[in-house]
Amino acid sequence: TVKAVIFDLDGVITDTAHLHFDAWRATAAEVGITIDEAFNDGLKGISRMESLQRILRHGGKEQAFNVDECRALAQRKNARYVQSLASLNEDALLPGIRDLLAELRLAKVKIGLASVSLNAPRIMQALGIVPAFDFCADAARVARSKPDPAIFLAACQGLGVRPEAAIGIEDAQAGVDAINAAGMLSVGIGHALHNADLHLATTTELTWHCLSGLWAR
Ligand code: B16
Ligand code: MG
C-alpha cells in the first residue's frame, strides 16, 4: 500500500506562480526583456538561477551579464517576491488541501514536501501547515532542478520510504517528469500535463479516496 504522499508547493498547496511572474516580469523589464504568462508557465518548478538563465536566453541576453550581475538580478527578483509574500496566510491554501492533509494523517500515510523554492520554509510557516508535514526536503541541498528527480528522492529518503511506495503531486510538467523519473506514482493537477499516472483538474478533487484508488489500479 501507499506509504507516503509527497507534495509540490507552488501550484499544489498554494498558488504563488503569479507572484513569481510579477517579480520576474519587473526584474526582466529592468534589463529590457519582456515575458508573458505563457513563458512563465515554463518556469514552474524551475529553480531561481535556472529561471533567470531561461529569461536571459529568451531575451537573447544570455552572455550580457557576468556571474555577479546574474546573482544581483536574482536577488532583486527574490526581494520583490518575498515582499509580495508578506500578506500570505492560511486563506491561501488551495481548496481541498487542508482536508487531504487530515485524511492522510488519519490513514497513517507519511506526508512530505518536495519544493525547489528556497522560500518554502517561510511559505509553509505563513500557511500554518508546518506541523502537518513529516519531512520537507531542503531545496538548498539539492543542486539540480526538476525534472531531475533529486528533490523527490530527498523527500522519500527523509521520510524513510521507498519511491515505489510513494505518490507525488505536481502542477508542472517538469515536476511530473521528476516524479516519474524517481520511480514514484505521479498525480498531475491542471491541464496540459503529459504522462501523469492520474490527472485531476483542480486540487478540489484531491482526496485520500482517489489517491488510494490510484494505488489499487
Ligand atoms: P525560489 P515549486 C518553484 O516552486 C516554483 O514553481 C518556481 O517558479 C520557482 O522559480 C522555484 O520554486 C524557486 O523558487 O526563488 O523561491 O527559490 O513548484 O517547486 O514548489
Ligand atoms: Mg509547482
Image: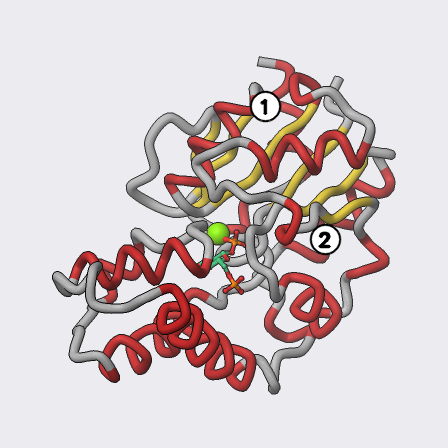
Q: Image height check: is 133 above or below 94?
A: above
For the residue labelled by badge 1, is the local secondary structure a helix, a strand or a loop?
A: loop
> Quick one: label 2 or label 1, which is nearer the N terminus?
2
- What label does residue 32 carry, if any? none
The picture places residue 196, in percent across and down from the top left corner, at: 43, 29
Q: As rendered, which of 72 and 107 lies closer to the eye?
A: 72
The figure's colour scheme reads secondary structure
Q: Amino acid at mark 2?
A: Asp
Q: Circle 2 is placed at which residue position?
A: 99
The residue at the point 40 percent across, 40 percent down is 174
Alpha carbon distance from label 2 to label 1: 23 Å
The residue at the point 66 percent across, 39 percent down is 6
Q: Quadrant of the N terminus?
A: top right
Q: Image height check: is 12 above or below 19?
A: above
Q: As rendered, which of 69 and 46 lies closer to the eye?
A: 69
Q: As rendered, which of 200 and 188 lies closer to the eye?
A: 188
65 on left or right of 119: left
Q: Residues within 10 Å of mark 2 (few under 14, many from 20)?
A: some
Q: Quadrant of the C terminus?
A: top right
Q: Circle 1 is placed at which residue position?
A: 184
Are dots 2 and 1 in contact, CB under 8 Å?
A: no
**Comparing marks 2 and 1, which lies closer to the viewer?**
1
The picture places residue 80, in percent across and down from the top left corner, at: 46, 83
The residue at the point 27 percent across, 68 percent down is 65
For the residue labelled by badge 2, is the local secondary structure a helix, a strand or a loop?
A: helix
The picture places residue 87, in percent across and down from the top left corner, at: 60, 86
Q: Amino acid at mark 1?
A: Met
Report the number of numbered marks. 2
